Image (tube, rainbow, N blue to C red):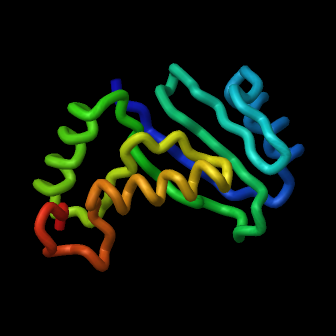
């Protein structure tokens, strides 16, 4: 089952964890020194926040798929919508080490980035 992913950069992680925990009615599923994540069922979203020196605000959006078939379905819909997007297969993201590994997965999968548009196997 697909899940929306939203990642927000924040200025004060502690205050933001308190705010979102109150808003969602639950504490984070994962909490680290510069990062917190909620895996919510209603709404079905992977909501993450981090304090990593970025300008506060939306960091990135995504659609988390449970398997290859769902990921391919999402990719086909993005192609049909003429979207420029890329897939991060096996992306267990969100620590710096995991993000680096996910980037390797994207490169290895030949996924689409804006600079790759029009190349064989790319989505736009």
In the displayed structure image, the side of residue 113 where residue 90 appears, left or right: right
- Location of residue 35 in the rendering, given as x and y in whole percent from the top left corner: 75, 46
Please identify the quadrant where the C terminus is shown: bottom left
Question: Which image quadrant for residue 3?
Answer: top left
In the depicted view, which residue is nearer to us: 21 or 52?
52
Name the quadrant containing residue 46.
top right
Residue at 11% across, 68% down: 120
Q: Is residue 122 left or right of residue 110?
A: left
The percent coordinates of residue 123 (x first, y second) are 18, 61
The foreground one among 4 and 86 is 86
- Counting from the top left corner in percent of width and height, residue 98 is at 59, 48
Kindly identify the residue that appears in the image at 31 percent across and 30 percent down: 67
Q: Is residue 76 left or right of residue 3?
A: left
* Residue ID at (47%, 27%): 44
Residue at 53 percent across and 40 percent down: it is: 92
As drawn, 120 above or below 13 = below
Task: State whether residue 116 is above or below residue 123.
Answer: below
Rendering coords of residue 59 (x, y %): 58, 60
């Amino acid at each position: 089952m697909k899940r929306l992913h939203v990642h927000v950069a924040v200025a004060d992680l502690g205050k933001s964890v308190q705010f979102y925990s109150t808003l969602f009615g639950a504490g984070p599923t994962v909490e680290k020194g510069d990062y917190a994540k909620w895996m919510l069922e209603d709404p079905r979203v992977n909501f993450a926040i981090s304090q990593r020196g970025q300008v506060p605000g939306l960091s990135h959006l995504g659609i988390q798929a449970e398997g290859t078939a769902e990921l391919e379905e999402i990719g086909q819909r993005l192609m049909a919508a003429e979207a420029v997007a890329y897939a991060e297969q096996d992306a267990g993201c969100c620590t710096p080490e995991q993000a680096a590994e996910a980037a390797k997965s994207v490169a290895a999968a030949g996924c689409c980035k804006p600079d790759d548009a029009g190349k064989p196997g790319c989505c736009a």
